Image: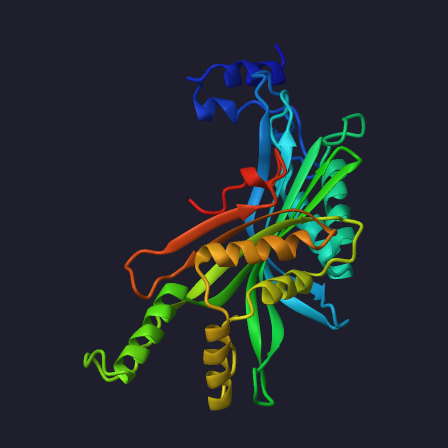
């Protein structure tokens, strides 16, 4: 019996001692060290995704204004592992991503190049078929300039963002963008009751309070995940602009007094329940043909209640992102 056969007999026995397993390895790497990852496996168990997460590296992005900016990123990358395989060479995942990141900026072409290299370059031998699926996720905080509402100022607004890409075979390539968007939401019911009270106080119908009532409003967050046409020229900024259009009461990065007053006026013009904000995004996201599918989770961090108001809305494609549960 060869060492490889002995090793597989041990692998098939769940009670085999780890100390025994590491003794048997006929396959060596270029340095002459035991290469257990390349040993054949007879258990017949496939693994849909195997790889690494939390790889930190700097990557360059081209912003829609043509400016190139480096961002601190955290990457996760995976391959499917077919039955009969013991493992993958995980260091190659890192090396490939770093090489591509040094030579290119991040866009759909970058994502596809990385995934194709994963599928082809992590094969154990030339005779092996390419991996059927490859996955890449990049998380980062994306800065954009935000103009003040009234004063001649601006500040940096940061958007927690995620890029995800999946390659299946040679032809199916999917790209997803997720962005978190913070905004202020004023409760329509609370605003109405406040104004009703002020009218009644002015008319002498009540003496309660001092004649001024403040509607409750709160910081809110929309987490939007979209699937884009990988052939389009869609920028992350385009998604942020869609959200600004649908919900204009975005939290501000730099305000003077005139901006603060303008923000109060803007909130008064756009009172909204979480349901209203959801429907606004539904109309806006559906208006862009470059967005193939989408799902949004909205959460209003109530200033009146101890609990939050939440809504989840999606494009409604059967089998699409409607199955993607962003809120749990």
Front residue of this view, candidates 13 and 139: 139
- Residue 275, position in %: x, y? 47, 54
Query: Of 228 and 311, which appears nearest the observer?
Result: 311
Nearer the observer, 244 or 117: 244
Tell me residue 193's x, y (percent): 33, 69
Q: Is residue 168 above or below residue 183?
A: above
In the figure, residue 143 lies in which quadrant? Answer: bottom right
Judge left or right: residue 74 versus residue 312. Answer: right
- The residue at the point 71 percent across, 43 percent down is 174
- Please state, as top left, top right, bottom left or bottom right, where the C terminus lies in the image: top left
Q: Position of residue 150 (x, y in %)?
A: 57, 87
Q: Position of residue 123 (x, y in %)?
A: 73, 33
Point 64% across, 54% down: residue: 285
Q: In screen coordinates, is 159 left or right of 271? A: right
Q: Is residue 160 visible?
A: yes
Left or right: 327 with respect to 4? Answer: left
| 278 versus 21 height, above or below | below
> Residue farthest to the left?
207
Q: 143 or 52: nearer the eye?
A: 143
In the rendered image, is residue 74 in sight?
Answer: no
The N terminus lies in quadrant: top right
Depicted 248 relative to depicted 48: above or below: below
């Amino acid at each position: 019996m060869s060492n490889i056969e002995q090793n597989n007999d041990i692998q098939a026995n769940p009670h085999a001692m780890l100390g025994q397993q590491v003794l048997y390895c006929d396959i060596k790497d270029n340095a002459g060290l035991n290469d257990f990852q390349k040993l054949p496996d007879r258990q017949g168990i496939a693994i849909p995704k195997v790889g690494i997460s939390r790889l930190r590296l700097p990557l360059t992005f081209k912003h829609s204004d043509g400016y190139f900016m480096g961002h601190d990123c955290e990457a996760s990358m995976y391959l499917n592992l077919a039955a009969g395989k013991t493992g993958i060479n995980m260091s190659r995942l890192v090396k490939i991503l770093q090489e591509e990141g040094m030579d290119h900026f991040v866009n759909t072409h970058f994502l596809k190049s990385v995934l194709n290299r994963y599928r082809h370059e992590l094969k154990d031998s030339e005779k092996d078929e390419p991996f059927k699926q490859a996955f890449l996720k990049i998380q980062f905080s994306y800065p954009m300039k935000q103009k003040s509402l009234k004063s001649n100022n601006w500040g940096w607004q940061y958007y927690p963002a995620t890029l995800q890409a999946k390659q299946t075979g040679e032809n199916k390539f999917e790209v997803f963008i997720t962005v978190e968007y913070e905004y202020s939401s004023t409760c329509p019911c609370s605003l109405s009751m406040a104004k009703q009270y002020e009218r009644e106080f002015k008319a002498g119908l009540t003496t309660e309070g001092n004649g001024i009532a403040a509607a409750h409003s709160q910081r809110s967050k929309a987490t939007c995940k979209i699937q884009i046409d990988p052939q389009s020229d869609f920028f992350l900024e385009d998604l942020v602009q869609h959200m600004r259009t649908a919900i204009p009461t975005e939290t501000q990065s730099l305000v003077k007094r005139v901006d603060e007053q303008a923000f109060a006026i803007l909130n008064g013009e756009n009172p909204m329940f979480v349901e209203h904000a959801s429907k606004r995004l539904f109309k806006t996201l559906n208006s862009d043909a470059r967005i193939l599918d989408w799902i949004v989770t909205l959460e209003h961090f109530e200033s009146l209640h101890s609990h939050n108001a939440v809504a989840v809305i999606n494009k409604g494609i059967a089998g699409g992102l409607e199955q993607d549960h962003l809120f749990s």
